[in-house]
Amino acid sequence: MAVHWTVPRCITAVYGRLNAARDNAVLVCHALSGSALVGSWWPEIFAPGAVLSLEHDFVICINLIGSCYGSTGPQSVDPKTGKAYGPDFPLVSIRDNVRAQSLLLDSLGIRKLRLVLGGSIGGMQALDWTILNPDRVERALIIGVAPLSAMGLALNHLQRQAILHDPDWARGRYLPQCPPRRGLALARQIGMLSYKSAPLFEERFGRNPNLREIEDPWCLNDHGGGLTGGRFDIAGYLDYQGERFIERFDANAYLAILRAMDTWDPMRGCGSPKEAFAASVPA
Amino acid sequence: MVREFANSIRAAGVEADYREMVSDHGHDAFLAEQAALVRLLQ
């Protein structure tokens, strides 16, 4: 039997200095569209007196496998075929990522984390750390985490469908110069509905027309109204978020991480929460 | 959802403390309102 071993690359950012006792390591786990550069997307946790200290902590952040920010992902070359994995990239679960992260820490000689933390998918990783390696984690900060609800799964389904229905999707074998931009932009916009809240949208946009490009939702047909009219402010905002996102993210990577998010459920296959979290219960 | 999940973890016997912040930013608050998050975590 031929076994193909592929060692994933895990791009890692580190901040601060590992002390001689190697007991000041902190692992920060990033969310869906994040990167290893935690200092750029979560700067305030490094503020004086906040959560982390560059003077005392050795902060590590590892890019998710499947992402498009350096770690092995759908854009990487599959050594078996010599071509990009594209849509053949396998499901790499949150738990798989945590296993890879713990191997990486082994290689740095870090036995125990003073702290592991993250929000959203980052929190899923942090929680899995406490389940898989309870003896290697002193403390975990798990922010905004639960297995996805039916509504969460629904919104992820629509995001996936948006990408798969893009005329440039090409079953995931799209060329780098011709990615499914519209599908990915729409997916991001659908995602924004669950990241933000209805009160925030109401306060910021209300029923205002889109003034970024001076549009009139009430305009009549003979003034360019057509079937859709001009956009409201919220529509202009969402479109803008979609446009920004496609400049920095890959559709296959997005799908890979959505799937890791969908399938995360520490209670799956366990009879009870007690069984699922048994390893994390102090003896 | 998150609160229920946290409660089930605590009910399982895990040493855990649950804290909540109120924000119009919803799920994104951990990125959008970092100062408030830091206060919550202290």
Image (spheres, rainbow, N blue to C red):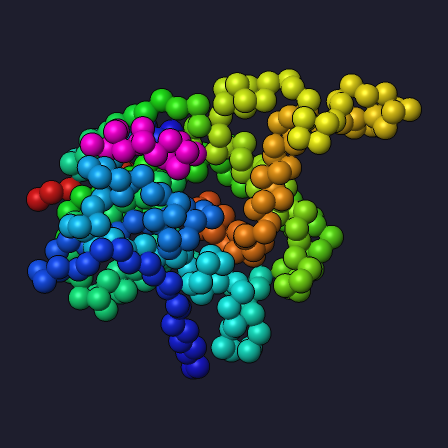
Q: Is residue A46 magenta?
A: no
* Image label count: 0
Q: Position of residue B15 (x, y in %)?
A: 15, 36
Q: Is residue A18 visible?
A: yes
Query: In the orientation shown, which residue stands out farthest toward the right?
Result: A222
Q: Give the prevailing secondary structure in the magenta stretch.
A: helix
**Residue drawn at (63%, 60%), measured in percent from left and top?**
A172
Q: Is residue B34 magenta?
A: yes
Reply above or below: A140 against A202. below
Q: Position of residue A138 (x, y in %)?
A: 15, 47
Query: Residue A111 appears in which quarter of the rendering?
Result: bottom left
**Residue drawn at (50%, 32%), measured in percent from left and top?**
A194
Query: Residue A117 appears in which quarter of the rendering?
Result: top left
Q: Is residue A267 visible?
A: no
Q: In the image, A21: left or right of A150?
A: left
Q: In the image, A19: left or right of A221?
A: left
Query: Residue A42 appears in which quarter of the rendering?
Result: top left
**Residue drawn at (54%, 52%), measured in percent from left and top?**
A248
Q: Position of residue B30 (x, y in %)?
A: 37, 35
Question: Which quadrant, please, contains the N terminus of chain A?
Answer: bottom left
Camera-nearest residue between A40 and A151 = A40
Camera-nearest residue between A211 and B6 = A211
Q: Position of residue A136 (x, y in %)?
A: 17, 54
Q: In the image, A263: left or right of A224?
A: left
Reply above or below: A230 against A19. above
Question: Which quadrant, please, contains the C terminus of chain A?
Answer: top left
Reply above or below: A106 against A241. below
Camera-nearest residue between A1 and A101 = A101
Give the magenta part as a residue range: B28-42
Camera-nearest residue between A114 and A144 = A114
**Residue drawn at (51%, 78%), measured in percent from left and top?**
A80
Query: In the orientation shown, which residue stands out farthest toward the bottom?
Result: A1
